[in-house]
Amino acid sequence: HAGRYLALLQAAASPDLAQLPALALAQELIFWRGLASAQLLLMQDAAPSVPLGLPATTATTWEPLLTQAITALSRVVNEAQASNAAHRLLLLQALQTRHHGRPQQAQAMLVQAAQDALTQGFGLDAGLSYELLAPWQGASATADPLDFLEAARQAYQDCHAHTLAARVQAQIAGWRKHLPRTTDWDAGASLDTLAVLRSVQAISSELDLAGLVQRLLSLIIEMSGAQLGAIC
């Protein structure tokens, strides 16, 4: 999974994407770049002795990228007051807080991010937050991960993201069969990133801006399990 997150970071660094205005499309890139960086950091934290197969200098870029994403989303929240930015900012801050060794505070922040997302009507982001919480519980045994997986499934189901809901249901079935518990090292497996990252890798080879936007829209549609989509 580390290589997939790196592919996302490389695609998001495309000069063509950097020229886009700081609207919905740019916010998606900021958020997913921050999320990928955070997940790589947490993977390294959970298994520092397990080689990720990456250049030694690569890891030094993850925390700055996460900090940059948090700073950028903070500006969006403070200046543009975008309704979908505040809970995503809190999500990234929660991951950063966990990386800094404060798991209980991070959990409370991520729960709040999920609740805020639901209040604002962003069921996909709520589901994502709950999915991220589930393996944390498996590692710490402070709560039942099934509670968070059930919440994620319901959030996805309510916004008709049936593919995502079915994937979470499969995770729930695995827990109920007493399969080995997930840790932060393989927390990336709880996210449906495979389809997303296939699209992101294709983006890096796209030279035409119109084609680039179309590929990004396809990425978002595939990630959400939707049949149609539009960027306004």
Image (cartoon, rainbow, N blue to C red):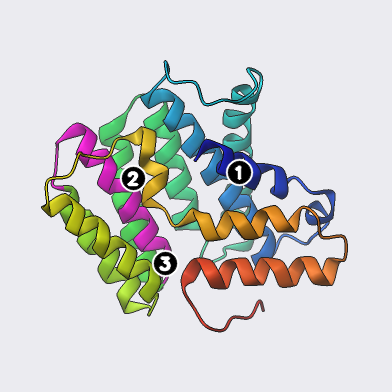
Taking the view exactly as shown, the residue that stands out farthest to the bottom is 228
Q: Nearest the camera: 152 or 187?
A: 187
Q: What range of the chain is rendered magenta?
A: 122-144
Residue appearing at x 68%, y 53% in the figure: 201
Is 136 covered by the magenta stretch?
yes
Q: Between disc 1 and disc 3, whose residue precedes?
A: 1
210 sits left or right of 54 in the view: right
- Looking at the rendering, which quadrant does residue 156 occupy? bottom left
Query: In the picture shown, does residue 48 fall above or below 40?
Result: above
User: Of discs 3 and 2, which sits in the foreground?
Assistant: 3
C-alpha distance separating marks 1 and 3: 20 Å
Residue 95 percent across, percent down from the top left:
42, 39
Residue, disc 2: 109
Residue 133 percent across, percent down from the top left:
29, 47
- Looking at the rendering, which quadrant does residue 198 occupy? bottom right
Residue appearing at x 58%, y 38% in the figure: 3
Residue, disc 1: 69
Residue 124, numbered label: 3
User: What secondary structure predominates along the stretch shown in magenta?
Assistant: helix
Residue 53 percent across, percent down from the top left:
56, 25
| Dot 3 amino acid type | Leu
Q: Residues within 10 Å of mark 1 (few under 14, many from 20)?
A: many
Q: Residues within 10 Å of mark 3 (few under 14, many from 20)?
A: many
- Total tally of numbered discs in the picture: 3
User: Of discs 1 and 3, which sits in the foreground?
Assistant: 3
- Looking at the rendering, which quadrant does residue 160 occupy? bottom left
Mark 2 element type = helix
C-alpha distance separating marks 1 and 2: 17 Å
